[in-house]
Structure formats: C-alpha cells, structure tokens
Amino acid sequence: MDNSYSQFIMTNLAVANDLIDKDEDYDIMWGEGGELLAEFEGSSYDVDSKSEIDCMVDFFNHKKRELKNKEKVRKRLLKEHKRMTLIGNLKHYYELDLENCLMTNADWIVELSKALTDKKYLKKFNKEYAIYLEERE
C-alpha cells in the first residue's frame, strides 16, 4: 500500500479516535498522522495476518487504553497534590509552622466534623486562608 494512503488512513482514524484534534490545521494533522504511522509501523500491531486498517484499529484501541491509564494516573497525582497543598495550607493557617496553634484535641474534632459535614467547608476555608495570608504578611 502507498505510504501516503496509509498516512491518510492513519490521520483520519486518529481524528475519529480523538487522538488528533479535528479542528487542527490539516498540515499539522498530517504531520501528527505521519508520526503515528511511524509508531504503528514499528509496533507489534502491524502484522501481515490482518488488513492494515484492522491493524490500525487495534493500534488505536491500545493507544486509547494507554491514554486512559495515563489520565487516571494524572488525576490521582493531581488529587494527591491538592491534598498535600491543603495540608500545608491548614498547617500554615493554624500556625503549626510557628508552633503557635492553641487548638485542643476537642477543637480539632469539632473542626473535622465541620469539614466532613459541610459541603462548602473547603471553599470557605480557602476564602479564610486568603484573608489570613494578607493579614500575616
């Protein structure tokens, strides 16, 4: 099969599988399709026992699973980053960094219960924290 035809098929399959933005300029799409074609041709999905299009579909199914897994990892890392940032902000707000926190264990339990039951707790805390930052500086 002509390499231009393969690149045309690869580019269009990539657009259909949302691996290339359909609103992208065609010359950029063509280049990205060429890169995917080169990756495909060097992969275990390019076999002689199936049609080239079927092999490309298998390749895209693999790419989509791969991207889905990367997205899961990215979301997990983002969630962990937000959690660590919140922990740092809480320590700063309650002046643990200054060893100036006057809260008792009972106070912490009350605060924790608020955080667990008030859906707007985080939003309220972030507003209070922003005001606190201005005052502390």
Image: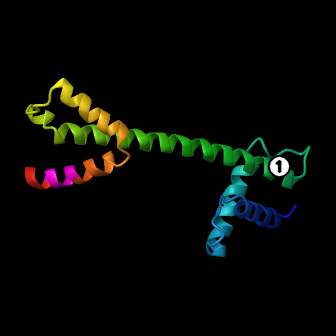
Residue topped by disc 1: 55
Q: Please report the residue visible at 68 percent of the width from the left and 48 percent of the height from the top.
A: 63
Residue 14 screen position, x and y as percent: 71, 60
Q: Please report the residue visible at 43 percent of the width from the left and 44 percent of the height from the top.
A: 78
Residue 131 is covered by the magenta coloring: yes
Q: Quadrant of residue 23?
A: bottom right
Residue 91 screen position, x and y as percent: 20, 36
Q: Quadrant of residue 92?
A: top left
Seen from the viewer's position, the closer of residues 91 and 106 is 106
Please identify the quadrant where the N terminus is shown: bottom right
**Residue 137 visible in the displayed image:** no
Seen from the viewer's position, the closer of residues 61 and 44 is 61
Q: Please report the residue visible at 82 percent of the width from the left and 66 percent of the height from the top.
A: 5
Residue 74 screen position, x and y as percent: 49, 44
Residue 86 screen position, x and y as percent: 30, 41
Seen from the viewer's position, the closer of residues 57 and 134 is 134
**Residue 76 visible in the displayed image:** yes
**77 with respect to 5 (left or right):** left
Q: Amino acid at mark 1?
A: Cys
Where is 79 relative to 22, above or below? above
Q: How is the image coloured?
A: rainbow
Residue 27 is covered by the magenta coloring: no
Where is 31 relative to 44, above or below? below
**82 with respect to 106 (left or right):** right
Where is 134 relative to 102, above or below? below
Q: Main secondary structure of the magenta part?
A: helix
Local crowd at mark 1 within 10 Å, few (<14), some, or many (≥20)?
some
**Range shown magenta:** 128-133
Mark 1 residue element? helix
Seen from the viewer's position, the closer of residues 105 and 88 is 105
Q: Quadrant of residue 49?
A: top right
